[in-house]
Amino acid sequence: MSEEILKKYPELATEGSPTVMQRLDICNKAVTQMAIEASQACIKNWGRPISDITHLVYVSSSEARMPGGDLYLARGLGLSPETQRVMLYFMGCSGGVAGLRVAKDIAENNPGSRVLLATSETTIIGFKPPSANRPYDLVGVALFGDGAGAMIIGSEPVSGTERPLFELHTSIQHFLPDTEKIIDGRLTEEGISFKLSRELPQIIEDHIGGFCNKLMATVGYDDKEYNKMFWAVHPGGPAILNRLEKKLDLLPEKLSASRRALADYGNASSNTIVYVLEYMLEENLKLKKEKQEESEWGLILAFGPGITFEGILARNLTI
């Protein structure tokens, strides 16, 4: 959002105006451009030619069109027309980890493949002008942010060329029955309208232990060893992080990467887990320089509409 956009589309600042066409005109172009830039930076860091990418997983809850953003991203990057594409739409905050889960499955079942995972989101699709009738909307405006992220996922890394960061060991998804209205998003003539129940942090707190224990048990960890793990948690909001920290009795530093991402970028929906992992790598490097112990195993977590829990047990390969 900017002054220039509001001057071009003044109707966005008028409550109740049917502006979904205008919003999509802005968002469809914006998310593609952000995804292209994030993907180009990722590919540059990867170090292999773009022609080596065999699959594309594209995640967004901020656009709607046919063909979808996956095609526009592939074209913008100059990917081969034979690149196999998967598009994940309207998964909200859990979309980034869901994309990792799908990319992991593709990579493991297609030897030699390299999957580009790209996420891109903008809040304009759900922007509401300030209103005395909806003071709670100001919380959403302050909490949510725009951005994009990208990762490369593959199996059997090429020695000397690729520098793997995390092994994605085990992934699971779980939805909680009868919680469909807790995060309620609808595409209307005014754009996307979101209603977030204040019960959400409590629901996550009530179910997080069992979900994490199921993942940890695959490598022999139990609920007494939470602080031996690293924690890459999508920061849906401060309340979710605070409750998770208290429920699992985590040391404060365990969620520092999540809190940094939230402070710097807000909740950028599916993108945010990319930022959290990037900050975690920075913190691991700092620990290494200070000769402090790093966690080998950890959890990558996100929570989205459904209520849906997405989780990946991962191994830190930078130790």
Image (cartoon, rainbow, N blue to C red):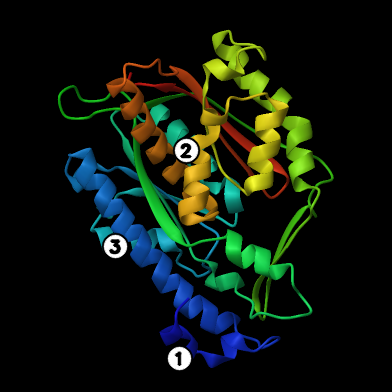
Circle count = 3
Distance (Cα) linking label 3 and label 1: 28 Å
x, y (%) of residue 140?
Answer: 64, 63
Amino acid marked by disc 1: Lys
State left or right for residue 68 relative to residue 196.
left
User: Badge 3 is on which residue?
Assistant: 75
In this picture, is 168 found above or below 97? above
Q: In percent of the image, x 22 and y 42: which residue is there? A: 45
Quarter residue 168 falls in? top left
State left or right for residue 150 relative to residue 98.
left
x, y (%) of residue 206?
Answer: 79, 33
Q: In percent of the image, x 40 and y 73: which residue is there? A: 29
Residue 257 image label = 2
Mark 1 Cα shell of 10 Å, populated few (<14), some (14-19), many (≥20)? few
Residue 141 image label = none
Query: Which of disc 1 and disc 2 is earlier in sequence?
Result: 1
Q: Which residue lies furthest to the top in this view?
A: 220
User: Badge 1 is on which residue?
Assistant: 8
Query: Which of disc 3 and disc 2 is earlier in sequence?
Result: 3
Q: What element carries label 2?
A: helix
Mark 2 or mark 3, whichever is nearer to me? 2
In this picture, is 21 found above or below 185? below
